[in-house]
């Protein structure tokens, strides 16, 4: 049962409330009379927004142990979330009758205050409708209309509207004019006989009524302070253990004071005295390890912590204490750069008792190890070795082996853009166009002046019949080329692209798939919305010579070529 309870608590701290419900349910199967388990599951259900189940578990708590005030807290909290504020308040008030401990009493009182606040808000919301169209209703009533011109009455009406509660201030309601206005707003007669303008019978005035001042309530005698409850009697062995613990804690307190003042030698002496007095307390050894850590003697710290954990297990120490010892051990291993053991300690700590600190340290350590491993993996010389192997496999048409080698070459040297170019070539050979294009784009971003990659890009796009993208790559290469031979080669490649596009355009009906693909391209959309291009396209419909005039402008010509390559503009 304890194992499932602990697992439920750990899941709850991790905010995995569904798993918490599962674990608490397993614990309940083994101990169906344990109110704490039902209370814990009630909270988990509530966090999962299963309000009715949360209420059901809370009521089970109350049924099993009516004097357990915490059960009423659970029920009240669930009812609050259900917005049944009246029932929630009653649950909290019932809990107050069960002699709750100080902490539970605070929770009950806070619940009562919250329920009262919600009830008051609900009432305010209900009364708010009374004031909808208030001034129009009063202005349309012949009798109340005249009150709106009286400054005193108008001020009281505004005060009433601001309060949000028509019955919140009895002094306002006693004013006959205000009472009449409320009658109009509520649609009921709130006035007693003798309203404004009517004569009151003799003796009905307030000055004629006999009044009796209420006598002040007698002062309550001050209650004597409750005497502290006597502690349960302890046998001789228990008294001896208590005295030992108090004496050892006194030495620990001295050690803590020295530790804060950075007097480590004195602190260590005090902790050792505490251990000598009470060798069964694992936390004194943990304190001793803290001193060793400050002295950067991590081996001694680890030895002390391992002994502490051994004692903690033997003495059934609290899970939280053992988790702290393991977290501290992990820090020592981390300082010694033994990150595998550090992670192992953090993981063991989390299984004992979850804490944000241990979780954060585990995550940070793993991230650091991965970063260092990646950095240490970089080796440009080995990258070139893998490049040679990759070329050999490519020559033998062992494409998969070649891909593995070029991939390893890139990992060994993330600046090796030629590894991407070669891998794109191999992907092209096995017709893996998406990966081939991805490598081309990455390579062009890394090395914009590496012209060979533009050739690969153009060939792939031509095969996919995305001639406008092939044309763009060819134009970019022409701009990047510094040697005349390279410019000439790419000019020839550009003509090849335009010829292929023209043949596709003249092959019959437009390729709808090709057109849809082109229209998704931002470059094509920008060209189509260019006012100059729109004007040229309109002129070309009626004036055949407009095409030649347009092509004489290099800027316009390049855009028209893109439309031709995309299949949107057909010539001839």
Image (cartoon, helix red, strand yellow):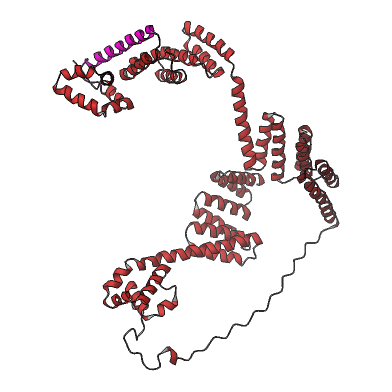
User: Is residue 193 rendered to the left or right of residue 54?
Assistant: left
Image height check: is 244 above or below 62? above
The chief SS type of the magenta part is helix
Q: Is residue 521 among the parts visible in the rendering?
A: no
Whether residue 491 is in magenta: the answer is: yes
Whether residue 230 is in magenta: the answer is: no
Q: Residue furthest bottom?
A: 202
- Can you tell which quarter of the image residue 496 is in? top left
**Which sits in the foreground, 111 or 82?**
111
The picture places residue 530, in percent across and down from the top left corner, at 26, 28
The picture places residue 348, in percent across and down from the top left corner, at 67, 37
Q: Is residue 433 among the parts visible in the rendering?
A: yes
The quadrant of the image that shows the C terminus is top left
Magenta stretch: give its range: 484-511
**Which sits in the foreground, 70 or 426?**
426
The picture places residue 19, in percent across and down from the top left corner, at 56, 43
The picture places residue 111, in percent across and down from the top left corner, at 55, 61
User: Is residue 370 rendered to the left or right of residue 275?
Assistant: left
Question: At 69% across and 38% down in the image, what residue appears?
Answer: 327
Question: At 44% across and 78% down in the image, what residue appears?
Answer: 171
**Which sits in the foreground, 60 or 359?**
359
User: Is residue 290 rendered to the left or right of residue 426?
Assistant: right
- Can you tell which quarter of the image residue 476 is in? top left
- Numbered circles on residues, count: 0
**Which sits in the foreground, 327 or 241?**
327
């Amino acid at each position: 049962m304890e194992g499932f309870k602990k697992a439920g608590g750990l899941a709850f701290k991790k905010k995995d409330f569904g798993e918490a419900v599962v674990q608490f349910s397993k614990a309940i199967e083994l101990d169906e009379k344990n109110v704490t388990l039902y209370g814990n599951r009630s909270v988990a259900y509530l966090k999962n927004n299963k309000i009715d189940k949360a209420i059901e578990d809370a009521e089970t708590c109350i049924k099993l142990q009516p004097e357990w005030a915490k059960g009423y807290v659970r029920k009240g909290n669930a009812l609050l979330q259900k917005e049944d504020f009246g029932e929630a308040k009653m649950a909290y008030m019932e809990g107050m009758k069960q002699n709750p401990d100080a902490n539970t009493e605070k929770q009950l009182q806070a619940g009562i205050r919250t329920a009262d606040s919600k009830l008051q808000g609900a009432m305010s919301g209900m009364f708010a409708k009374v004031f909808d169209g208030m001034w129009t209703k009063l202005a349309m009533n012949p009798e109340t209309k005249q009150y709106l011109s009286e400054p005193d009455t108008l001020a009281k009406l505004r005060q009433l509207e601001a309060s949000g509660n028509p019955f919140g201030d009895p002094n306002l309601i006693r004013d006959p004019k205000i009472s009449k206005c409320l009658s109009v707003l509520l649609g009921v007669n709130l006035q007693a006989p003798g309203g404004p303008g009517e004569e009151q019978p003799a003796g009905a005035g307030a000055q004629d009524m006999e009044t009796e001042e209420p006598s002040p309530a007698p002062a309550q005698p001050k209650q004597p302070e409750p005497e502290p409850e006597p502690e349960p009697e302890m046998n001789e062995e228990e008294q001896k253990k208590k005295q030992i613990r108090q004496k050892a804690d006194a030495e620990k307190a001295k050690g803590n004071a020295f530790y804060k003042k950075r007097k480590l030698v004195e602190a260590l002496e005090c902790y050792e005295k505490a251990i000598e007095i009470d060798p069964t307390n694992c936390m004194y050894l943990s304190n001793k390890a803290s001193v060793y850590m400050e002295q950067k003697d991590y081996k001694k710290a680890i030895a002390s912590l391992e002994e502490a954990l051994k004692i903690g297990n033997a003495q059934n120490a609290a899970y939280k204490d053992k988790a702290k010892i393991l977290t501290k051990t992990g820090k020592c291993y981390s300082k010694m750069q033994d990150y595998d053991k550090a992670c192992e300690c953090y993981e063991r700590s989390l299984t004992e008792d979850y804490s944000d600190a241990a979780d954060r340290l585990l995550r940070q350590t793993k991230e650091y190890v991965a970063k260092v491993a990646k950095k240490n993996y970089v080796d440009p010389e080995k990258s070139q070795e893998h490049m040679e192997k990759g070329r050999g496999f490519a020559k033998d048409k062992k494409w998969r082996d070649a891909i593995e080698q070029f991939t390893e070459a890139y990992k060994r040297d993330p600046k090796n853009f030629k590894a991407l170019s070669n891998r794109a070539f191999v992907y092209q050979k096995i017709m893996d166009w998406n990966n081939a294009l991805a490598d081309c784009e990455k390579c062009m971003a890394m090395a914009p002046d590496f012209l060979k990659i533009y050739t690969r890009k153009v060939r792939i796009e031509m095969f996919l019949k995305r001639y406008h993208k092939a044309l763009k790559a060819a134009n970019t290469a022409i701009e990047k080329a510094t040697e005349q031979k390279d410019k000439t080669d790419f000019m020839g490649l550009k003509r090849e692209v335009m010829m292929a596009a023209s043949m596709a355009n003249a092959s019959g009906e437009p390729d709808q798939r090709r057109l849809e693909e082109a229209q998704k391209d931002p470059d094509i959309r920008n060209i189509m919305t260019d006012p100059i291009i729109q004007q040229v396209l309109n002129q070309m419909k009626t004036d055949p010579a407009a095409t030649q005039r347009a092509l004489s402008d290099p800027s316009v010509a390049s855009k028209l070529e893109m439309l031709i390559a995309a299949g949107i503009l057909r010539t001839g």
